[in-house]
Image (cartoon, rainbow, N blue to C red):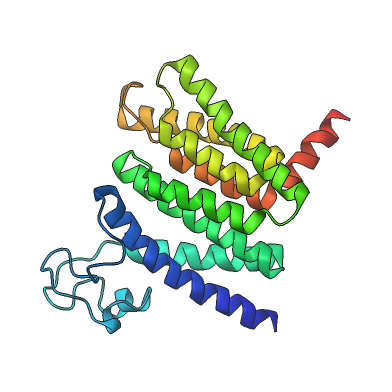
Amino acid sequence: MMYYIYLLFFVLGLCTGSFLNVCICRMPGGSSVVAPPSSCPHCNTRLGACDLIPVLSYIFLGGKCRYCGSRVSLQYPVIEMLAGMFFVLAAWHFGSTQGALSASVFISFLLAVSVIDLYHHIIPDKIVVFGMVSGILLNFYSIPAVLNGILGFLIGGGILFLVALVSRGGMGGGDIKLAAAAGIYLGWQNTLLMLFLGFLLGSVIGLTIVLLQRKTIKEKIPFGPFLSAAAVISLFWGNILIEWYLALLM
């Protein structure tokens, strides 16, 4: 029975990934994610249903547009597959429908934010508002959960807001709002872990990029993808990491 549930979540993840690609391409420019229908960015031909099957259309068409032969970005199948695999992981890890659904929505939010920030160095307010509202609807199911989510919200947004004040603009407003939204899903303990891991990943990987690409430290490296990766780690393995750390202190 569980295999059918995993398959269902995988297919749901593929379809969600397809929609996330639309959001990634349109939201930075302020375009609607609903209309107009999808079309080839090169020849503007409207795509049919057979052109929009997640992953399979890309494979069968050899990564090219059916109508003009232009190359299709590898981003499309990669995002679809990532969403599918993470949805299955959510179903396996949390088991319950509510937990798996909440984690799947959270991961979808993080995927879209990460790619948009990576490409455009912005985190659109609309997607952050979606993350906050969906987090409240999916996670505020009891008084302890509400309190935990509110504390996560305040800690995530508050700490990065203080960092922005101290660094005088070194932290963007989008990152602050992203951390606050993630806190609703993670609760206060895993939000602290997310921030620690986010700064750790950002420092190590950011410094490596600077050295390899010979960039100056003043060149902006988006923090959203690092914070999102840290949020995913905290979501799935946060309790284990926290228990391990506390055991070291005993």
- Name the spot of residue 80 as percent of width and height, x first: 42, 66
Is residue 46 found left or right of 6 in the rendered image?
left
Q: Give the number of callouts.
A: 0
Image point (37%, 32%), residue name: 221
Is residue 68 found left or right of 155 in the rendered image?
left
Of all residues shown, which one is farthest toward the right? 250
- Name the spot of residue 84 as percent of width and height, x first: 50, 68
Quadrant where the image shows the C terminus: top right
- Name the spot of residue 182 as percent of width and height, x first: 56, 44
- Residue 190 visible to the viewer: no
- Name the spot of residue 141 as percent of width and height, x first: 71, 57
Image point (47%, 62%), residue name: 82
Is residue 96 found left or right of 199 in the rendered image?
right
The quarter of the picture where residue 188 lies is: top right
Image point (71%, 38%), residue name: 189
Image point (56%, 78%), residue name: 8
Nearest the viewer among 163 and 145 is: 145
Quadrant where the image shows the N terminus: bottom right
* Residue 83 to residue 57: above or below: above
Of all residues shown, which one is farthest toward the front? 143
- Residue 21 visible to the viewer: yes
